[in-house]
Amino acid sequence: MLNFEKIRLMTRLTVYEKGLGIEDEKIAKYFRNDYVFGALIGSFAAGTVAWGICAALYCGYFFEQIFFSVYENKLGPTIRFAVTSYAVFILFFLLVTWLVYRFRNQGYMERRYYYEQDLDTLLGMYEKEQEQVRNWIRKNG
Amino acid sequence: MNDSGGFIELRENLMTFYKKQEYLLQPVFRFALSLGLLLLLRGHLAVHAAAGAILNSVLVNIILALVCSMVPYGAAAGIIALVMVWELYSLSLEAAGICAAILLLCILLYFRFAPRDIVILLLMPAAYALNLHYAVPVIAGLLFGPGAAVPVVFGLIFTRYVLLVEESLPEISRASAGGGLTGADILNNFRGLIDGMMGNRQLIILAASFALTALVVCFIRHLIIEHAWGTAIVAGFVLETAVLMAGDMKFGIHVDFVRLLIGIILSFILVQIVSFFAFNVDYLRVENVQFEDEDYYYYVKAVPKTIAPLYGIPADQSGMPSGSAGSAGDR
């Protein structure tokens, strides 16, 4: 005789394990702060390289103006613009990274909570079935 | 009703066939997409290069496409990107440099967060060649998240960049300069390419239209309303057309309306085909049920899937008893 409740529960568990559970395993290896901090370090490096690429393109485009600034020793405004743009860009990029990875970690925590709850329920169902078998044996043995 | 049952049964058969042959069909699709992109690059770039251009050899194209079919989409995109940069380098150093810069920015700023969205980046050039690029933001909004607007825009930028380089080749190529490019020539070519991209109003309006469409389609698709998918698709195409026409009136970007209309119609048909396979719930037969246990009251909205009738008997007339599995009263 089929226990439809157990079937539905096991289906939900299997769908999670074969789908999002595989990605959640990667998040499960770290504490939340370590996971987010690791992502922030990666984003800092990536953001710095990306800013460097944009700066190179900018310098290539405005090469003559920058060259004359160097020649006339008037690099101050250019350097101030570079530092300001880098600071604004990297802060924005780190904020986006923090939000994305916090959101991902939060999603993992919720899924993990419901997954463990379903596992406990399933365990309870198995224990109940075993109890029923033991009672039947006691009664008929 | 009989006709829709026939289509649904056909879809179920195709989906079953796909699930059984998925391990074979996925590489075939990747091969076809990679070969198409390499042949497009060949048609636009390699034909202008010297006789030794690697993409001019059909065998090399096929071998590269075979390699791309055996690796994940991210690696396949990396291979095609390297081939593109190499072909551009053989034509013009400045063009290759800008292309490599845009590629690196793509990877560093977006694809490290969502590597799976790279398939959208690969689909855009192929769709553009077939005048089906209006479908890409709508499909991206339906099947991916709101961030899909980014690869849609990057795909468009890469496509138009290759076309821009091809148009500018008489001025920027090494061959036309006779190998005697000076530093000033390099800087002028560099500025010309940047101006060609940044100053291209049609590209900016198209990119804005596609980004907005992907976001709006994604938003509407996630609403809990009836016919959310249908509404999202129609809204997406209306928004695309409206933004392009507004851009034409305001900024004079000279949109080819005949080509636009044909593209929108073909894209609409393509999106309908994709949504037919991707969307499998029937909001016309929604059931609202209520039950309780010790801890909670459950208010459940059950949306039945459009499953093909078994042995020709419609699903709601199958004669199954009301207390059996899957019915609304079952707890």
Image: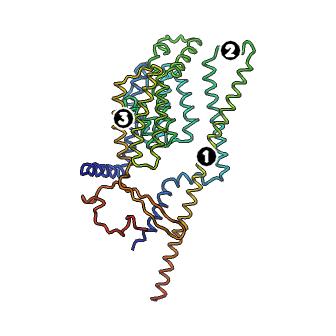
| Residue with the mark numbered 1 | A101
Rate crowding at label 3 as few (under 14), some (14 to 19) or many (20 or more) other CA atoms within 10 Å: many
Same chain, labels 3 and 2: no
Chain of the residue displaying label 1: A
Q: Position of residue A15 (x, y in %)?
A: 47, 57
| Mark 3 residue element | helix
Q: Position of residue B32 (x, y in %)?
A: 37, 37
| Mark 2 residue element | helix
Q: Position of residue A123 (x, y in %)?
A: 53, 70
Which sits in the foreground, A69 or B239?
B239
| Residue with the mark numbered 2 | A67
Rate crowding at label 1 as few (under 14), some (14 to 19) or many (20 or more) other CA atoms within 10 Å: many
Compute the Cα span from label 3 to label 2.
49 Å
Give the total of numbered labels: 3
| Residue with the mark numbered 3 | B267
Which sits in the foreground, B271 or B170?
B271
Which amino acid type is shown beneath numbered disc 1?
Tyr
